[in-house]
Amino acid sequence: MASAFVNQNVRVVTAQIAGESQSMDTAAGRILLTAKSLAAQHRDTGNYMDKLRVVDVPGESGTGRTVKDRLVVADDAAAASIEWGHIVRFPGQRRAKFVPGQHIMRRALAATGMR
């Protein structure tokens, strides 16, 4: 049986090359546009939609150079509640109500066919 030696830095170098690719920007842009479209269906004030954006973040470092990754983020203070849901408590009462999340980011990722 034959074997081959694979340099451990190959994974990092490959990620560095992909990180500089225009295709990564295009994919992040598609997810962002889809998320904004889904958020528009549920907007009250538009604050959540206005705070959706793509950011470049450092990925795994290897040879001293960093890998450029992209994240689609929602910087709204209520982003977690909007995504996953929250509990509303009624003042002066013991009852509470669960408001289901919109799952905008998860649905945007699924709609673009990326994982």
Image (cartoon, rainbow, N blue to C red):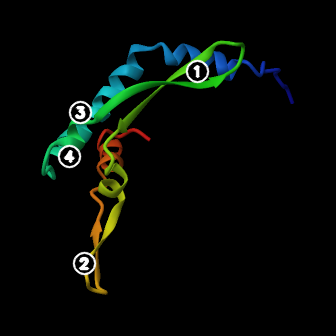
Q: CA distance from mark 3 to mark 2?
A: 38 Å
Give the total number of marks visible in the rendering. Answer: 4
Near mark 2 (Cα within 10 A), the count class, few <14, some 14-19 or many ≥20, is: few
Nearest to N terminus: mark 1 or mark 3: 1
Residue 15 - label: 1
* Label 1, label 2: how far apart the Cα atoms are: 52 Å
The quadrant where residue 25 appears: top left
Q: Position of residue 69 (x, y in %)?
A: 50, 25
Residue 80 position in % (x across, y down): 37, 53
Name the residue located 29 percent from the left edge and 49 percent from the top edge: 104
Residue type, label 3 = Leu
Residues at marks 3 and 4, CA–CA distance in whole angstroms: 10 Å
Per the image, the residue denoted by label 3 is: 33
Examine the rendered structure and indicate whether residue 105 appears above or below residue 27.
below
Judged left or right of residue 27, residue 59 is right
Mark 1 belongs to which amino acid? Ala
According to the image, label 4 marks what residue? 39
Mark pair 4, 2: CA separation? 29 Å
First of labels 3, 4 by sequence position: 3
Residue at mark 2: 91
As displayed, is residue 90 above or below residue 4?
below
Q: Secondary structure at mark 4?
A: helix
Closest to the camera, between mark 3 and mark 4, is 4
Q: Relative to the observer, which residue lies in front, 40 or 81?
A: 81
- Report the front residue among 56 and 115: 56
The residue located at (48%, 13%) in the rendering is 20
Three-letter code, disc 4: Ala
